Every structure is written in structure tokens, then in C-alpha cells.
Image (spheres, rainbow, N blue to C red):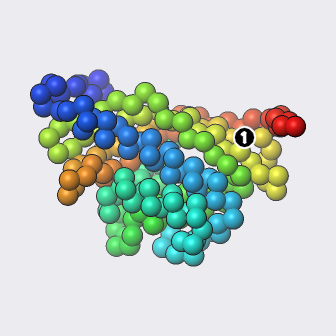
Amino acid sequence: MAEMFEKGSAKDISVLIRKEIESLPITYAYATDCFGRATDALGDQSLDSTINLDNPLFAEGLSLYRQIFSKDFTFSLMVEGVLIEVVPNPESQGDAVLEWANYVNNAFRKGQYKSTQHHIGSINSSILENSAVVQSYLIATHVYSEEAKDTGVSITWGTYTDEVSLEDGSWLIRARSLDVISTNTISGVSKLAVE
């Protein structure tokens, strides 16, 4: 795996290009948390649904996803290296970014979360002329709402791997995978009293 992340020489890859590419996972985390906070968005929607486009947080998350994903991107979910699901279906001819936004929103509404925080760290990239591979670590905190059957928080740890390409002058994620290594629920987390 280490050979995948050999750095190009300074003359080949500018600091600005590396910064642009390595900002993609951070923008993804912020966009995903927009969906986490969109508690009044409707869940259980078809992946091509446009019903939540008027929800400001859903719209913001979708707009940010459109800035970082190629139009035909895919997201692969794995658990300890075993492929669980690919979204959208690679044969789909629909709007891949909208389908992923609805998938994320549906998952958060089903989990009855009132907020999420996706922390991205240890970002490492291997950049070629018009493509790159970016790997980053994830710690995601999902806070259950008062209506949820669970209490406290659900925390997920994993590793993202992104295949990135230069398309019309912008670096975009073409394929993203998340390999989850653990998910744990911490029940009854004390609430902070702010008085």
C-alpha cells in the first residue's frame, strides 16, 4: 500500500494542486453533516427523488457534493474489506450525485439522528498528471434524536479511498470507497447543561 502513496517530485505537483485534491475529503465531510442536520428532510425516498430540494440543509449538502463528485461517480461501502453495497448502481443512468445525496439522507433519517460529525484525518495522496488516489481516516459521530429507539451516539471508524480525476479543469472524486472497521453505540451519553 505504501507504494501507492509515493510523493511526486515538487516540480511535478504543485502545493496548490495537492491542497485542492486533499480538500475533497474535508468538503465531503462538511456536506455529509449538512444531511445529518437536515432533520426535517423526508427520509425513505427513492434515490432519484427531488422532494427535499427545497430543504436548505439538503440543498447545501447536494450543492457541495456536486462540487466534489464527477457526474458518474460511485460509492462502495465495505466492512472489514468485504464489499456490502455500491451506490448508485453502476448501470444507473440517473443523477449519481442526487442518488448518493438521497442515500445519505435516507440513512440518517432511518437512524433518527439529530446531528452528525464526520472527522477526516491522516489524508495521504498519490498524484499523477490527471489522476490521484487519496486515502483518509474517518471517525463519524451520529447523535440519536429524542425520538430514536437508541440513545446516545453511534460512532463509526473507517478508511476512505478516493479515485480522483481532473475533469474540465477541476479535480473530482470519480469513485469513493469506505471500509468500516468498527461501529459502536455509546448509550446514555450525558447532555451538557448550558445555563
- Say whether residue 14 is left or right of residue 117: left
Q: Residue at x 82, y 56 (%)?
A: 147
Read off the residue under disc 1.
Answer: 153
Rendered location of residue 158, percent (x, y): 51, 35
Q: Quadrant of residue 91?
A: bottom left
Q: Amino acid at mark 1?
A: Val
Residue with the most extreme front position: 195
Identify the residue at image location x=45%, y=41%: 26
x, y percent for residue 186: 75, 35
> Which residue is found at the position 68% from the left and 41% from the top?
154
Q: Quadrant of the N terminus?
A: top left
Rendered position, 64 above or below 177: below
Q: Would residue 46 be seen by someone viewing this image from the given angle?
A: no
**Element carrying mark 1:** strand
Residue drawn at x 34%, y 73% is 93
Mark yes or no: residue 72 visible: yes
Corner quadrant of residue 34:
bottom right
